[in-house]
Image: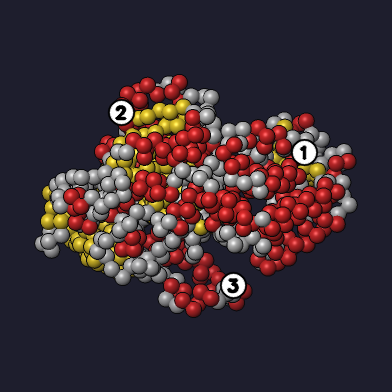
Amino acid sequence: MPLYAVRWTRPHVPESVFDSVSQLQRADVGALNPVGFDGTLREATADAGAARDELSDFTVLSRRSARLEPGAHISFCTYFNAFPASYWQRWTNVRCVRLTMQVRGEGEISVFKSTARGLFSTVKTLEVCGDGWTQIAVEIPLSGLLDGGYFWFDAYCHPSVDGDKVGSDALTIRNASWQVPVADCVHRDVNGGNNQSAQSGSAGATEDNGGHRYGESDTYVGANRHRPTCSIAITTYNRTPYCLRQLKAVAGESELRKRLDTVYCIDQGSDKVCEQKGFDEVSADLGSQLAYIQQANIGGSGGFSRGMLESIDAGKSAYTILLDDDAIMEPESLLRSIQFEDYAKHPVLVGGGMFHLDDRTMLHVQGERFDRNSLKPCPPAGASYNHDFAVSPLRDSPELHARFDCDYSGWWMCLIPNSVIREIGLSLPLFIKYDDVEYGLRAREHGYPTIGLPGVAVWHQGWHDKDISRTWEEYYAQRNRWICALLHFPNAGKRYVFRMMYEDAHLGVKLMYSGMKLHHMALRDVMRGPGYLVDTLSTKLPEVRAAREGFSDSEVSQDVETFPVPVATFDNRRPALSGGELAKTAATEVMKAVLSRQDGTRDAAPQVGMKSKDAVWPSFDGVSSALVTTSDGNGAAWLKRDSKLYRRNLRECYRIATSLVRHWDSLAQAYRSADLASPDSWRVIFSS
């Protein structure tokens, strides 16, 4: 519910919102006296408690209607109900927005707008009084919002007062909708050209007193008679229940299906979706809108590329949405991404945010950047990971009202115009990991940015219960990130020797010697050139799995009783460190590991037992061996320090890294000139 509606609370804007210079100063918590500390804590907990109250006086009647009881005061400044005005001003030609709804009862509707600082003001307050339905509309200019800002409305139902009746009827709202002028719609055709005829008419269009023609819509923006269709590509590998659930979700959304051309279900597993109970029913429901395709397992990049290729070859859809098989979608999000693309001034990629599946109000990220220093994903400038809207609603999170620019969107959900696919190609044949990163960077270089559009998201399993450094996936993560670097940072090789050494040292400090081997294997394979990616796309995984064998960290048992009882239990209590102190400590730990003479391979029992969440590099200081549970909680491995192997591995990494850097420019040229992502290249892969 906090993603849709929250209880109104007293507005509280921190002082830093008014003064940008204050953001440069370090907060001196130690300077607070007890009175000041208690006051700050009391105010924060009081507001947070009010925001988390159950909405007992607010009833959801249907998908598009709700009722407020007398005295209720509700804010729709929420993730899914606030209008991301800044993004519409920046990326579309729209210059005015209209809020419409039908209301009945007694109360007030207050419309607000915010700035990039998170400051907000009232646009208009409308009194509602009457037993019958009343249509209200408020037009808001879309200006002054390039840096950020939202539109939203709050609803207040007058309370009943004995003896002097102010109001007694509930306030009911239905069919609230944000609309934009039909004339501003661009509507690209399947080839990426502007469909000018689409701007001349509208299904059910209405005209207000200002002369703007708006489309009546059950979704995000105005409807239009000449709307292009969209295809959806879902790839799956032995996740048949999840994939079937996704197909059923699409089939059950009538508004989405009006814009849907085809759902391409690419099944690469041995447990076939078509053999699941219920598949025949959903297949019959979707009819010609479903294309079920079986192929060998060539990873997520192979599955999504097949969907892209089928979509552009069919030549009917203007857009393709890539959708993870195990994501739970908010159907409105798919419509919003389609309609935003309809109105975008130029073709853009529209990315969806990711909420945690096991913590539904926690937004992991809306869009990401690829940091050219660490060569890893990171949040957009000014943003951060994991914002919980149940604790900090959008209305009370001024930092979220800024507009954020990203490099790419994860392929849990991402809309790509088919004209862009035809121009820049399909995914690289990377199997898994970084295919979405590379595609976003490639699109941006061709002039097609990715927009992480607020209000567009899916729920997906987070990464907190997964440590790929302890799995075969480490190989693909390391190999593919360096291929991304070669493709998009062609003259930056020399400064990356440290980064390669850092990754190796980090794995070894955690006693992950199988990870070090996979890291070396990945770097060697990068130097084999682009042709190697295609040649081994369907055969590399068994080789990677085999490379991990023989290391203590890869010998996992689901029966912990097979291991000796650890001598001690790891105590994770340690002092917190600043960023600088953490970096110095890391360097110290690496040097200690390099100089160590410990040999855990001779331990009769693990020195410590360690939970998976504690298995970070500072925990292994002075530890000769540790029994560590796996990140999925289903087993454990006895990690053993081998100081000689660690030193040998670091030397080997330095040799490989310096060799790769020496050949950086020529390798970059080879990868950039290779025809890896073209439809013709993929057709060869699919036919083999």
The one nearer the camera, 59 or 642, is: 642
Residue drawn 55% across the image and 71% down it: 37
Label located before the other in sequence (1 or 2): 2
As measured in the structure, the alpha-carbon distance from the residue carrying label 1 to the one carrying label 3 is: 47 Å
Label located before the other in sequence (2 or 3): 3
The residue tagged 3 is 29
Can you see residue 390? no
Is residue 366 depicted above or below 140 in this figure?
A: above
For residue 13, which quarter of the picture? bottom left
Is residue 196 depicted above or below 628 in this figure?
A: below
Residue drawn 15% across the image and 56% down it: 213
Badge 1: how crowded within 10 Å, few (<14), some, or many (20+)? Answer: some
Badge nearest the viewer, 2 or 3: 2
Label annotation for residue 551: 1
Can you see residue 273? yes
Residue type at mark 1: give it: Phe
Q: Is residue 564 left or right of residue 238?
A: right
SS class of the residue under badge 1?
loop
Is residue 687 depicted above or below 347 in this figure?
A: above
Q: Is residue 43 left or right of residue 174?
A: right
